[in-house]
Structures are given as C-alpha cells and as structure tokens.
C-alpha cells in the first residue's frame, strides 16, 4: 500500500470511528478507570456561557493548525480543563472547524503514533505530511463531528478526570437522528504558548487511542519498505 493510499484510508476510518458505531440509549453507562479518584463534572455554571453563532452550512473544511510544540512540564489545573471543555462544546456547536482544529496538536498525535518505529526519514515525513494534507482536504473527524452537530447531533463534555497520569476530558458524541453514539476521552497537554491542546483521543468504539490506530496502519508500510526495521513484536 502506498503512503497516499494509507493516509486516505486511515482518514476515512477516523471519520467512521469518530461517529457513533452503536445505537444505544443516552443513559448508556461508561466505564473509565482514572488513576485518580478526583474528577470534575462539567456543568453550565463551570464556565461563562457563550452564545452560539450561526455558521453557513457550506463552510469549507479549513486546514489543521501548523506544527504545535508540546511542553509536558507545564502544569494543568482542573479549572483550565473545565473551561477548555466548555470552549470545545461551543466551537463544535458553532461549527467552527478551524478553531476546533487549533485545539488539536495533530502533529503531536502523529508523532505519538510513530514513536519508536524505525523508518527512513523519507517515509516518516511522507506519512506525517501526507496525513496533514489529507486532513486539510477533508477536514477530518473535526468536520465530521461539526456536521453531525449541525444536523441535530451533539457533542457534550461529561467530566474532567485523570488517567495514565494525564488530565483527560470525557465527552459524548451523539449523531443526528439517533444514528449512533460514541465516547471520546480527550488526552490533554499544554503547548509551549501555555494553551491546552488535545494530543490524543481514546475512542470507545474502537477501544484504543487514535495514535494506536494510526500506528497499526503505519507499521505495514514500514515493513513494506524494510521488514528488518521492525521488532519481532511490531511484525
């Protein structure tokens, strides 16, 4: 499979797993095992209300933001996570695709996917650059989520919690016309400018992080280039 073929098929898969994969009731229980027992439920009083604005249904799918550098040493408070969650909800409701993409460090997520995989610089760069270009062309899962919200679906932040030593935001994504439901656990970190960013997403429909999904698609391409570059486990 070529790099372009993989990138296209992976983005299509991401669009699918970002949406609801099972038709369940709104009260479906969700199991999350945080490393801390402390969590914060996001309510309307947790952050200032922002009045949604009307956005044309024909708005184009903007490009993701440029390379974002993450600083894992910057502290993150629960209050910052709550405010971030409310901001995300409003931006999705407004179908502000560019602003939502600005909250996601896609390049950091891709680097998590390829971390530790021995591949040529050419293959690595082709994968990362090709993926970003495909996201620019399609809008990726952000466009899919915003379109679903515009058509009557919803994206609601449920709570802030800790998992695997990192702050996360649990969100529920419901497609329009009760077509499906999914849950996203958003992994957060701060960029060097002090802004909170989403650096990965645990998708309940697939039972794994997006970076893991990307990695599983990336390994066969690396193996095709040079099987000896992969460890026995990766093969």
Image: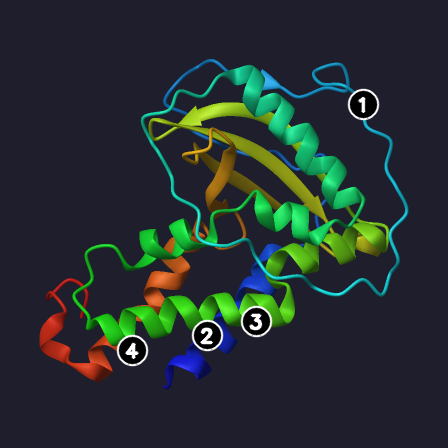
Could you tell me residue 232's position as x and y percent?
10, 66
Q: Residue 67: horizontal and vertical position, in percent?
A: 44, 53
Is 135 in front, or is 169? 135
- First along the sequence among labels 4 and 2: 2
Label 1 residue SS: loop
Q: Which residue appears at 79% of the width and 43% of the height?
A: 93
Front-most of 25 and 43? Answer: 43
Task: Quadrant for residue 213, please give it.
Answer: bottom left
Residue named by callout 2: 7
> Which residue, as the protein is rendered here, is positioned at the far bottom?
1
Residue behind mark 3: 12
Tell me the quadrant of the picture where the C terminus can be found. Answer: bottom left
Work out whether mark 1 precedes mark 2 in sequence or the reverse, and give the earlier one. 2
Q: Quadrant of residue 140?
A: bottom right
| Tag 4 near tag 3, CB within 8 Å | no
CA gap, disc 4 to disc 3? Answer: 17 Å
Vertical side of 100 occupied by 221: above or below: below
Residue annotated with mark 1: 49
Give the Cα distance between marks 1 and 4.
46 Å
Residues under labels 4 and 2: Cα distance? 11 Å
Q: Which mark is residue 221?
A: 4
Q: Mark 4: which secondary structure?
A: helix
The Cα atoms of the two marked residues, 1 and 3, are separated by: 34 Å
Residue visible at 43% across and 24% down in the picture: 162
Is 113 situated left or right of 176 in this image? left
């Amino acid at each position: 499979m070529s790099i372009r073929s993989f990138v296209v098929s992976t983005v299509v898969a991401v669009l699918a797993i970002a949406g609801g994969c099972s038709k369940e009731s709104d009260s479906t229980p969700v199991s999350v095992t945080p490393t801390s027992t402390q969590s914060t439920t996001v309510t309307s009083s947790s952050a200032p209300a922002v009045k949604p604005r009307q956005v044309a249904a024909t708005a184009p799918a903007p490009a993701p933001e440029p390379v974002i550098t993450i600083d894992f040493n910057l502290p993150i408070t629960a209050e910052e996570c709550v405010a971030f969650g409310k901001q995300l909800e409003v931006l999705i409701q407004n179908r502000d695709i560019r602003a939502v993409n600005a909250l996601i460090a896609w390049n950091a997520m891709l680097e998590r996917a390829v971390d530790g995989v021995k591949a040529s610089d050419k293959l690595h760069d082709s994968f990362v650059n090709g993926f970003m270009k495909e996201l620019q062309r399609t809008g990726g899962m952000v466009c899919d989520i915003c379109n679903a919200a515009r058509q009557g679906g919803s994206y609601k932040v449920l709570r802030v919690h800790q998992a695997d030593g990192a702050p996360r935001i649990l969100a529920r994504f419901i497609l329009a016309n009760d077509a499906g439901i999914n849950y996203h656990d958003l992994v957060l970190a701060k960029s060097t400018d002090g802004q909170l960013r989403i650096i990965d997403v645990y998708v309940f429909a697939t039972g794994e992080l997006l970076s893991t999904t990307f990695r599983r698609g990336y390994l066969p391409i690396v193996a095709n280039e040079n099987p000896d570059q992969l460890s026995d486990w990766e093969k």
